[in-house]
Amino acid sequence: RIRVRGVTIHRPLIYGNNAVVLTPEEKSLLPVAAKDHTHRWTVAVRSAASANDSDIVGGADDLNYFIKRVSFKLHETYQNPTRNVDKPPFEVSETGWGEFEVQIRITFVPESGEKVIVLYHHLKLHPWTLQVAAEEAVNPAPEISAKSGPVHSWQYDEIVFHDPFQSFLNILTAH
Ligand code: SLL
């Protein structure tokens, strides 16, 4: 396979999470083991090439032409904390009560010959105005949290490929 020396190509993406406070109805439907859960959240990796600012951040550009798998490693309090997602949308939705760091491993398509990359995202449940209370381990009352609406915590990044294989460059530029 031939590397195209001197070429750098990048793909913009967004990773992060949305979170909403569970309504009393939603809470009542949770399994007994999850009765202490307060939020529903989604952690995701999305393309920034077609991002918009709707509730679901990120766009329709699927990423799967160059990403083979996104593996989200959740806090060990979750069952099967490693969640592998092999097709878009590259996301995991769960309920929970606490914030923690999510490890996000991105594996590229085999044609790329690229190594896995690892990103970290601090799952955010509480709006910054309530963060002080949360840090003092006095979680804000759900009715107070609910009033401030959904939390969005997203980061922009660019995946940079140096000297890509010709075949991978073809895949990237065809999109
Ligand atoms: C904390 N370091 O102590 C964090 C850990 C863990 C969050 C937060 C669900 C667990 C489950 C959940 O929200 N874990 O019931 O499966 O604040």
Image: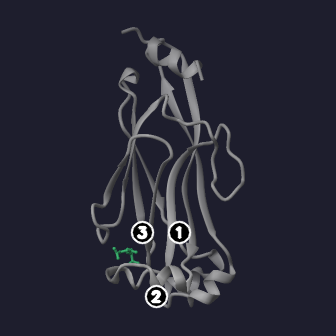
What residue is shown at x 61% (from left), y 83% (from top)? 145
> Element under label 1?
loop
- Residue 55 at x, y = what percent? 66, 59
Q: Which mark is residue 100?
A: 3
- Residue 144 at x, y = what percent? 64, 88
- Residue 28 at x, y = what percent? 46, 85
> Element under label 3?
loop
Circle 2 residues within 10 Å: few <14, some 14–19, many ≥20: few
Q: Amino acid at mark 2?
A: Ala
Front residue of 131/55: it is 55
Q: Amino acid at mark 3?
A: Phe
**In the rendered image of this protein, does residue 90 appear above or below residue 116?**
below
Q: Is mark 2 within 8 Å of ligand 1?
A: no
Circle 3 residues within 10 Å: few <14, some 14–19, many ≥20: some
User: Which quadrant would the N terminus be assigned to in this image?
Assistant: top left
Q: CA distance from mark 3 to mark 2?
A: 14 Å
Which mark sits nearer the N-terminus, 3 or 2?
Answer: 3
Q: Is mark 3 within 8 Å of ligand 1?
A: yes
Which mark sits nearer the N-terminus, 1 or 3?
Answer: 3
> Element under label 2?
loop
Q: Is mark 1 within 8 Å of ligand 1?
A: no
Q: Which residue is mark 1?
A: 124
Q: Which mark is residue 52?
A: none
**In the rendered image of this protein, does residue 129 appear above or below residue 91?**
below
What residue is shown at x 36% (from left), y 37% (from top)? 116
Q: Which residue is mark 2?
A: 137
User: Which quadrant would the C terminus be assigned to in this image?
Assistant: top right
